[in-house]
Amino acid sequence: MNGTQVFLAILVIAAVTALLRFLPFLLFSGRKTPDWLIRFGGLLPYAAMGMLVVYCLKGVTFGALPGFLPALIAGAVVVGSYVWKKNTLVSIIGGTVCYMVLVQFVF
Amino acid sequence: MKKYIKKAFADTVPVMTGYVVLGMGFGVIMSANGYGPLLSLAMSLLVYAGSMQYAAVGLFTGGASLVTAALTALAVNARHLFYGISMTEKYRGTGWKKPYLIFGLTDETYSLVCREEADTDYCFLVTLFDHIWWVSGTLIGALLGRGLPINTEGIDFALTALFLTIFTDQWMKKKDHVPAISGVVISVLCLLLFGPDRFLIPSMIGITAVLLLYMRKEKTV
C-alpha cells in the first residue's frame, strides 16, 4: 500500500476499534445495565486477564526446548518475583530482561 | 483531579515500560517497511490498540483490502466489548470525560481502571498517561528507525509480563478462582482447536457461556 492507502486503512481500523469500545456504552446509555450483566462484568476481568496471558503466549511451541523454555522460565520469574515482592515494575523488568537474555544468548 | 496525578503516574509506570518499548517496536517496524513517522503517529493516536497495530503492518505490506483490514480489526479487537460491558455502570455520568475514557480503554488501561477503588478522575488520568506513553514510544521508534544500538529481540515479553503480574495479583486478591481458571483453560482449548490466528473469538464465546452458567449455579446454591 502507498501512504494514502495506508492512511485510509488506518481510519477504517480506528473506526472499527472505536465502535467495539463504544458499543456496550451506547447499548446501555439510556437504561440501567441489567443486574446479571453487571455481575457478569464483575467476573470478566479475571477471565479476560487469563485469556490475555494465553494470547501473549500463543506463539509458544512444544516441539523443541527453545520453543517454550524461555517463556516458561521468564514467566516463572515474573510470577515468582511478584508473589515474593509484589512490585509490578521489578517483575516486568526482571522477567523481560531474563527473556531477552534467554532468546538472544542461550537458545 | 490534581490529587490523583501522583498515584495515576506511579500506577502507570509499568504500563509505560511496556508501552514505550512496544510503541518503539511498532514505530521501528513501520519505518523498516517504508512508512514514515506521520503514519505511525496517526495510527497510535487514532487506533491506539497495540496488537492490532502490529497486525496492521502486515496488512499494509501485503496490500490487504479495506474490508480485510476492517474484519481483522473486528477479530483482534473484539475483546474490547468485554471491557466495555464491565465498565458501563462505572463510567455512567462521567460527563465530558466519558468519550475519552471509552476511546482509551486498552487492555492495560482496563487492568488499572477495572479495580473497584478507581474513581473517575483517577481513571481519566490513567487513560491519558497510558495514551501518552504509547504515542511517545511510537514517535521514538519511528524517528530512530532501525538505528537502535541494542538488540531488542524478545523485548515484547514486557507485555506478557505485565498481564502475568496483573493475573497473579488478581489471583492473590480473590478467593474465587473459577473465572480466572476458566479464562485460561478455555483460551488454551480454543488455541489448540482453532489455532493462534483465530482463537480469540471462540474463547470469548466460551468464556461468556461458562461464566453465565457459573453465575446461575452460584445463585441457586
Image (cartoon, coloured by chain):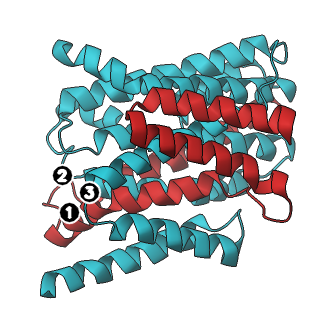
Q: Amino acid at mark 3?
A: Lys
Of the chain colours in the picture, the one used for chain A is red
Determine which residue is flagged by label 3.
Answer: B174
Determine which residue is flagged by label 2.
Answer: B89
Q: Disc 1 and disc 3: Cα gap in Å?
A: 18 Å
Quadrant hosting residue B178: bottom left
Q: Which mark is residue A38?
A: 1
Q: Position of residue B183 (x, y in %)?
A: 45, 66
What is the chain identity of the residue bearing mark 3? B
Residues at circles 1 and 2 in contact by the CB criterion of under 8 Å:
yes
Q: Earlier in the sequence, mark 3 or mark 2?
A: 2
Q: Quadrant of the C terminus of chain B?
A: bottom left
**Total marks in image:** 3
Residue at 86%, 60% (x, y): give it: A64
Observer-nearest of B76 and B100: B76
Q: Is residue B200 visible?
A: yes
- Chain ID, cyan in image: B
